[in-house]
């Protein structure tokens, strides 16, 4: 089939309205790129009427074999699928585990997630599986000795060795850690709020349905910001005088939720604060370090 006819067929078919169709289009382009001469492939590309950047992205999708087993989890447009081709294996695994790779994911959300991860300089852990087989049953003592020896060796490579179901163990430990951090931050927020709550007028308390300080500290984020703005007279005044309270509240909510999507959004909010309000940079950096 000549390049012009191939281009016409692709143009009629379109770039794809589902992940499966997008992958098929990308794979077709990648195959023809190998089969045709550079000149003929140029004719094919121009004949589709698609922008060169679209062709480039579809080619990247077609060449990335890692996407095939993820087909049912991928978004339905090439623009949302393409960012996944730019990720390392560890980053792609993290995107899947954190629920960023979803059929309803938009390209903006995916790009923001990538930006947050790389701006924050977070290390992306890689899990390596090992299976050990013993000819004879190990006694409790010998098993402990073996694990100790393996752990010492693993540490020289910067690897933390965990026996058994790593994902479950890690998840439970991380949840407990978040709860402890959240409680500590909540006490800090109460300490900051005490003198502020004391001067909240009866009118504001009635408006926001505040009876005790916990109604403000444990309530919705918009309630806290609403009260602080009223007390400060403006948003600018709130950030200047009470911005730290907002940051503590975001970090508390991060540590409370089990939703990966919400944690991503809370982390993103703090990074936005860091970019806009330089006087809070040190606090935000400290809070980000506590957001496991």
Image (cartoon, grey):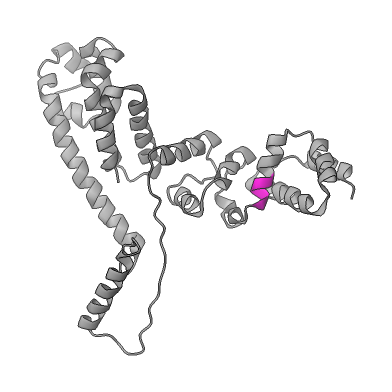
Q: Quadrant of residue 165?
A: bottom left
Residue 17 seen: no
Viewer-side residue, 140 vs 202: 140
Is residue 27 magenta-colored?
A: no
Viewer-side residue, 216 vs 123: 123
Q: Quadrant of residue 159?
A: bottom left
Is 51 placed above or below 123 here? above
Residue 222 seen: yes
Identify the residue at image location x=51%, y=54%.
Answer: 89
Residue 48 at x, y percent in the picture: 80, 37
Residue 151 at x, y percent in the picture: 28, 69
Residue extending farthest top: 233
Q: Say whether residue 86 is left or right of residue 57.
A: left
Is residue 62 magenta-colored?
A: yes
Q: Say whether residue 38 is left or right of residue 26.
A: right
Viewer-side residue, 174 vs 126: 126
Q: Say whether residue 224 is left or right of residue 129.
A: left
The residue stretch that appears in magenta = 59-63
Query: What is the chief secondary structure element of the magenta stretch?
Result: helix
Identify the residue at image location x=28%, y=28%.
Answer: 281
Tally the marks.
0
Q: Quadrant of residue 136?
A: bottom left
Is 130 placed above or below 190 here? below
Residue extending farthest front: 156
Residue 124 at x, y percent in the picture: 40, 51
Identify the residue at image location x=72%, y=35%.
Answer: 52
């Amino acid at each position: 089939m000549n390049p012009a006819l191939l281009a016409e067929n692709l143009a009629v078919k379109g770039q794809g309205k589902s992940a499966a169709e997008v992958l098929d289009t990308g794979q077709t382009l990648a195959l023809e790129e190998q089969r045709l001469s550079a000149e003929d492939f140029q004719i094919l590309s121009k004949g589709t009427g698609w922008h060169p950047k679209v062709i480039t992205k579809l080619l990247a999708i077609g060449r990335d074999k890692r996407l095939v087993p993820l087909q049912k989890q991928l978004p339905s447009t090439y623009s949302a699928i393409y960012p996944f081709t730019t990720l390392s294996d560890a980053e792609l695994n993290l995107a899947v585990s954190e629920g960023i790779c979803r059929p309803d994911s938009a390209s903006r959300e995916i790009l923001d997630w990538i930006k947050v991860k790389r701006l924050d300089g977070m290390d992306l852990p890689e899990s390596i599986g090992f299976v050990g087989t013993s000819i004879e049953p190990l006694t409790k003592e010998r098993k402990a000795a073996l694990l100790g020896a393996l752990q010492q060796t693993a540490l020289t490579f910067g690897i933390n060795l965990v026996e058994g179901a790593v994902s479950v163990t890690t998840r439970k430990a991380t949840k407990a850690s978040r709860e402890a951090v959240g409680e500590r931050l909540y006490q800090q927020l109460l300490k900051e709020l005490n003198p502020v709550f004391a001067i909240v007028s009866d009118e504001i308390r009635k408006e926001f349905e505040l009876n005790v300080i916990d109604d403000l500290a444990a309530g919705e984020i918009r309630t806290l910001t609403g009260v602080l703005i009223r007390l400060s007279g403006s948003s600018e005044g709130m950030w200047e005088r009470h911005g730290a309270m907002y940051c503590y509240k975001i970090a508390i909510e991060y540590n409370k939720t089990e939703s990966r999507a919400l944690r991503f959004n809370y982390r993103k909010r703090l990074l936005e604060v860091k970019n806009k309000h330089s006087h809070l940079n040190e606090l935000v950096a400290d809070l980000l370090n506590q957001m496991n």
